[in-house]
Amino acid sequence: MTTLTFDSLNPATGQVVGSHPQQSAEAVHEAVGRAEEAAAWWAGIGPAERRRRLLDYKAVITRDLRELARLVHEETGKPVGDATLEIVLAITHLDWAAKHAQKVLGRRRVATGMIGMNLSATLEYLPLGVVGVIGPWNYPVFTPMGSIAYALAAGNAVVFKPSELTPGVGVRLAELFAESVPEQPVFQTVTGLGETGAFLAKDPRVKKIAFTGSTATAKRVMAACAENLTPIVAECGGKDAFIVDSDADLPAAAEACLWGAMSNAGQTCVGVERVYVVDAVYEPFMRELTERVARVKAGEHYGPITMPGQLDIIRRHIDDATKTGKIVTGGPESVRAPYVDPVVVEDVPEDSPAVREETFGPTITVRRTRDAQEALNLANASAYGLAGTIFSRNARRAMELARAMRTGMTAINSVISFAGVPALPFGGVGDSGFGRIHGADGLREFARPKAVSRQRFALPGMNLTSFSRGQEELDRLIRLVTFLHGRRKR
């Protein structure tokens, strides 16, 4: 039977980068079967051997960093420099996961308390088996590796379905892994369109799905997973807010805001889309921002819109925002496919699509607020809750705002900096998804807790879990519990 293929295209030129098979349900089924066998072997070699091989994989990716960055550039259109930064971040996460997996997941003793004084207890985190990863196109190395690296370090095998826009990157990641682990197909890539990802999500032998993409697609993936009660960690979209307080370093804030909004053509789930500036510094901040944005050029500082269909959403949001708000930079004419020039619009109503919906383009809305509290309230008035930014020189005030921001991550006096800290968990709330990748939470996300209690000796006169138990033993228990827990706190 002839296997259907599809092409990945360079979004800037339309040229074919590569052709890949649209893998069928049978092909995905076979890949999961191979992964199931590989998972047993991978778990069996133990944490020390997994650490060694993952660190070797890190070295292999580092060796081929330039080649991989070039491939990312070709399939996404982003500048090679941005692709390089993405891969470097992925390397640091792989390094952290490999080196910390045993400490985070390994067996440890747990206190049993007075009632369980005759017991010993241990807790450890065991591999799930096969983990399916469905990755995005905007950061085709960094984002999926946030799941792949941590799932592998936790002792699982991985079947990876990359975006149909960046399949070549996904294939290459698995090929490089095979250099470090040639014995078994511990990490495989399957290519195809949306139905290939559905085949993976519906396979009952897949013990967890890690998904990154839109909220709407996440709901469809969850429905597929529900057939087998397969758990899912979902990192979905965002509409991240950037707050500039009255004492902020304005040049630094403007620089960070611009990068967070425009880098990767705004195609960043944790990118800046909404800006709230305290009235006292609004005018000078806007001067700083306007001066800088005038120097940023599409096609030079950032690449094209990778997914052609996103242009319609970006155009709709720009049209709406410029009709109701005040244009600072750009406008409807900024959309010149496949590129979009920077767009900054002030005073856009909070109920408009440009403020409520994820744009995923190089556009921002800016609003003046009375104070930082109003800015926070507006920032939190969103269905999304992925990340955000606070700029303030007052460390205590900045921390209060950051903690109160309804997001999974917040950066202070920097932008998206949490992504570069491997020990920090990454994920959102609300329409931005649930579960966490990265850090210790990310390792535990791909493992199952295993609790074991062992009786060391029998408690004299306290045989409570027996049909021979008498009233005298219950009376002793009540006296003990009253002594331990009966005093009220006033």
Image (tube, grey):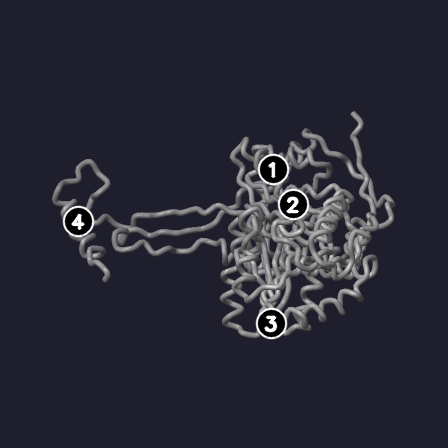
Question: Which mark sits nearer the N-terminus, 3 or 1?
Answer: 1
Question: Which mark sits nearer the N-terminus, 3 or 4?
Answer: 3
Q: Quadrant of the C terminus?
A: bottom left
Between 438 and 412, the one nearer to me in the picture:
412
Foreground mark, 3 or 2, reads 3
Residue 312 image offset from top left, x and y in percent = 75, 44
Residue 269 visible in image:
yes
C-alpha separation, residue under disc 2 versus residue under disc 1 = 10 Å
- Neighbor class of circle 4 (other Cα within 10 Å; few <14, some 14-19, many 20+) is few
Secondary structure under the numbered disc 2 in the rendered image: loop
C-alpha separation, residue under disc 3 versus residue under disc 2 = 38 Å
| Residue kind at label 4, given as amino acid type | Ile
Q: Quadrant of the N terminus?
A: top right
Foreground mark, 3 or 1, reads 3
The residue labelled by disc 2 is 213
Q: Tell me the number on the disc at residue 221.
A: 1
Q: Tell me the number on the disc at residue 478.
A: 4
| Residue kind at label 1, given as amino acid type | Val
Residue 52 image offset from top left, x and y in percent = 62, 56
Question: Which mark sits nearer the N-terminus, 4 or 1?
Answer: 1
Residue occupying the point 51% across, 51% down? 444
Residue 179 visible in image:
no
C-alpha separation, residue under disc 4 versus residue under disc 2 = 54 Å
On screen, residue 146 versus residue 169, left or right, reads: left
Q: Quadrant of residue 3?
A: top right
Question: Which mark sits nearer the N-terminus, 2 or 1?
Answer: 2
Residue 111 image offset from top left, x and y in percent = 34, 56
The residue sitting at the top extreme is 1
On screen, residue 124 versus residue 346, left or right, reads: left
The residue labelled by disc 3 is 280
Secondary structure under the numbered disc 4 in the rendered image: helix
Between 77 and 47, the one nearer to me in the picture:
77
